Image (cartoon, rainbow, N blue to C red):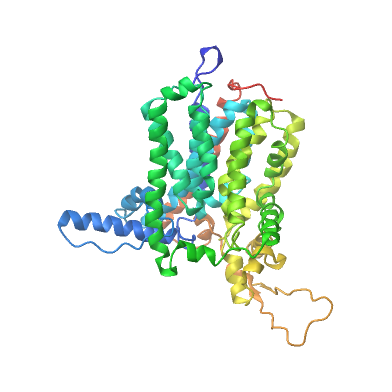
Amino acid sequence: MHLQHGKRLNLHPAICLLGGVFFIYLAFSPGTVAGMGYVSEEVTAGNQLLSNAVAWMKGNSPVPIDWPRHGLLPVLFDLPFLGVGSHLPGPLNQDWVVSIEPVLFTALLVLVLFLWLRRLTSPGWSYLLTLTATFCTMLWPYAYIGLEVKQSLALMLAGYLGFSRDTKITWSHTLLFGASCAVAVSAKASGTFLIPAVLFIVGHFYWRGSLGELRGQGRKLLATLAVIFTVFLSNGVVRSLFYRRYGDQGDFFGSWLVRGPTEYLLQVLGYFGSPNKGLIVYAPILLLSLLALTRMPKAHRPLTIFTLLTLCGLVGGYALLRIYTEETWGPRYLHTAVAPLMLCIGATRSRLRAAAAAPVLVLAALGFWVSFLGTFFWYGGPHVAARDASQSTLEAVQGDIIWNPILFDERLFSSYSRGGPEWWMPDHTWWFERPLDAPTVRPVHLAQHAVPQPFLFRLWRAPIHGGPRRLWYFHLLCFPVGVLLVARAGWLGRNGTARLEHPTV
């Protein structure tokens, strides 16, 4: 990728930023994937695949594979981490190594976002927006939860490559582009909702202004589509093996369909403004993204279409189900739309100015506090507490303000900061009178749930020695190293020249 006046983009800030984000994320890592959604299913399947590979080499009989709900493809990305972790001793066990995977993939997602922003706007503006996305949105908590990260990274990489119109299309580029598109639509069952966005990227990449040029790239276009749909269909077959216990995928998802158009529309609205699960609640900066979509320059219309296809595909697809959100942190099904939406803010401003930076900083501060809470405590705390209080209905998770995860984690943080046991009564306000046969409300022992998730804080007061103590110091050292690298990235890029693909307003 070349810049104006023949200068090549300086990658040093990007490399420093990648390292800085990775080490800061790692400093706050829980060091485990236990309790992180369906990750355990993929770890089990990955270990079974590794065991079968060893059995095959020794001539022994293989063990059956317990296929996870999203098929084989995401497990393939886990195998290197599982393999390395299985040979490490002491506290550097497989669980700890696997916990690094979403941290690394999220840092790579941030890198792609930064490079893409550098093509749209100035170095200062791209740096500020990247850090805002990194620490003030759902990207930070999900660097540890691990769900959605592979899909989000693959879609951003596919978009970055697909919008590189000045890049000569080689076969190696074609295969990388096709593979990233294939992972984007196949890594999760929800990838089906991203097919329109991915097909748009493919069309934008190969269409160079004339049918003659398109015909010249015909074989590469067909190869790209073949890779996408071969991977998509093959992984779909493996994914269906998981749902055999429920009959099939159609029976399982059919039982969760909404009951009418009104419920569907209410869930669409809930994706954006619900206090418990709204996108702008868990990533306030994206309020500016939604505003930016209404005033994108005409030159950036392809980016607008790509972002809308991504966002509307995920919202429109998942809102068909009554489980449009669940107990995980925020609207996790929209995780993949966060980075594309951040691009839209960058595309509407060519320079960093105080008037534009002020609202970003205010919303970033709000988002930082929300994301910090999601990082500091395990996302399942409110659900476990609601279950113990006999109030863990899906409706309570989605809409009961009493069980709002942000408010709950604020209570936990207050309890953790002060120390000592503390009880909280999740009592509802009856309007007007409490029925005589109303169920008894059970109190919640906050101290039981106020256990920090990061390894660094979880063992802050624990008497640990040997390997665990050295690992604790490693996590502690990661933070200043990460901060220095992030600061170095800003220093190196302060006088850089961004290549603006089109003039912006």
Q: Is residue 234 visible?
A: yes
**In this picture, residue 431 sits left or right of residue 28:** right
**In this picture, residue 47 sits left or right of residue 151:** left
Q: Nearer the viewer, residue 179 or 229?
A: 229
Residue with the most extreme bottom position: 436
Q: Position of residue 174 (x, y in %)?
A: 40, 31
Examine the image and state in which quarter residue 452 appears: bottom right
Q: Relative to 203, does residue 451 appear above or below in the rendering? A: below
**In this picture, residue 43 sits left or right of residue 309:** left
Q: Nearer the viewer, residue 448 or 177?
A: 177
Q: Position of residue 230 (x, y in %)?
A: 38, 44
Q: Relative to 213, does residue 466 appear above or below in the rendering? A: below
Residue with the most extreme left position: 59
Q: Quadrant of the C terminus?
A: top right
Q: Nearer the viewer, residue 469 or 378?
A: 378
Q: What residue sits 55% from the left and 12% below the top?
A: 5
Tally the numbered discs: 0
Q: Is residue 134 visible?
A: no
Q: What residue sits 63% from the left and 25% below the top?
A: 122
Q: Position of residue 187 (x, y in %)?
A: 44, 49
Q: What residue sits 59% from the left and 31% below the top?
A: 117
Q: What residue sits 73% from the left and 28% below the top?
A: 353
Q: Position of residue 427 (x, y in %)?
A: 73, 75
Q: Nearer the viewer, residue 367 or 76?
A: 76
Residue with the most extreme right position: 432
